[in-house]
Image (cartoon, rainbow, N blue to C red):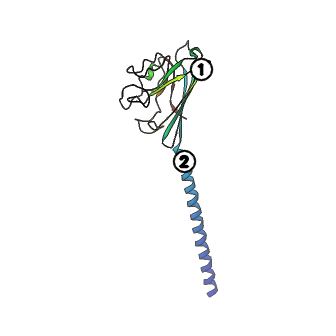
């Protein structure tokens, strides 16, 4: 009887120890999974595929937004062969609508109610991106990074559900309300990827 009690004690200690080990091991796995999920949610990606709004204009491109470490990096790539060696303005507009030759996008995205201007200098809209210089084949790229935008964050910073508009001319950064940038020749809706 004494040996059975000792054996029962040993088996009980073994089972308790095993359960403790399994519980700790599962907790570590859950912790690792939570860390992986947190890392995944820290970065977000959105894109606008840019197409011509005018039937007589050939225009293709993308506006690629990547959010990581509290900042959003934007890369705009354009191809507009008819405007080679020129510069064109690119803005974020308020509505996610490229209809009516880009007019459905309405005005510049301006949740802070500022005057139009040059990004990072004095007063400017959150949609005032700037000008893209096109090369001898009509291709151009613009890159910028900011902590003033988010992808899926607060409505005053969230770039999703707005449009990117490409204009036929350059933004002069002073004319109100939109920089006298010319007609809307390209458009794409910013959507989460």
Instruction: Specify the label residue 151 is tagged with.
Output: none
Categorize mark 1 by other alpha carbons within 10 Å: few (<14), some (14-19), many (20+). Answer: some
C-alpha distance separating marks 2 and 1: 38 Å
Q: Which residue is mark 1?
A: 135
Q: Secondary structure at mark 1?
A: loop
- Who's the residue at 58% across and 14% down the image? 82
Quarter of the figure with residue 124: top left
- Who's the residue at 57% across and 17% down the image? 85
- The answer to whether 23 is drawn above or below residue 40 in the figure is below
The quadrant of the rendering that contains the N terminus is bottom right
Q: Secondary structure at mark 2?
A: helix
- The answer to whether 43 is drawn above or below residue 130 in the figure is below
Whether residue 1 can be seen here: no
Residue 149 x/y as whole percent = 45, 36
Q: Nearer the viewer, residue 43 or 16?
A: 43
- Who's the residue at 57% across and 64% down the image? 24
- The answer to whether 129 is drawn above or below residue 149 in the figure is above
Q: Nearer the viewer, residue 91 or 105?
A: 91
Residue lying at the far top in this picture: please name it.
56
Instruction: Specify the label residue 39 is tagged with.
Output: 2
Residue 156 x/y as whole percent = 40, 35
């Amino acid at each position: 009887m004494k040996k059975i009690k000792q054996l029962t004690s040993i088996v009980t200690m073994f089972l308790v120890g095993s359960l403790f080990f399994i519980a700790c091991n599962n907790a570590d796995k859950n912790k690792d999974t939570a860390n992986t999920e947190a890392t995944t949610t820290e970065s977000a990606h959105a894109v606008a595929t840019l197409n011509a709004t005018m039937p007589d204009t050939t225009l293709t491109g993308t506006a690629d937004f990547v959010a990581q470490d509290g900042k959003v990096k934007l890369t705009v790539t354009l191809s507009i062969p008819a405007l080679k060696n020129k510069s064109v303005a690119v803005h974020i507009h308020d509505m996610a609508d490229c209809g009516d030759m880009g007019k459905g996008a309405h005005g510049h995205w301006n949740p802070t109610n500022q005057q139009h201007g040059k990004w990072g200098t004095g007063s400017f809209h959150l949609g005032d991106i700037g000008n893209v210089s096109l090369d001898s084949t009509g291709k151009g790229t613009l890159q910028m990074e900011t902590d003033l935008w988010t992808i899926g964050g607060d409505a005053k910073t969230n770039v999703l559900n707005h449009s990117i508009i490409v204009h036929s001319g350059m933004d002069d950064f002073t004319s109100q309300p939109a920089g006298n940038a010319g007609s809307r020749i390209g458009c794409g809706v910013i959507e989460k990827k």
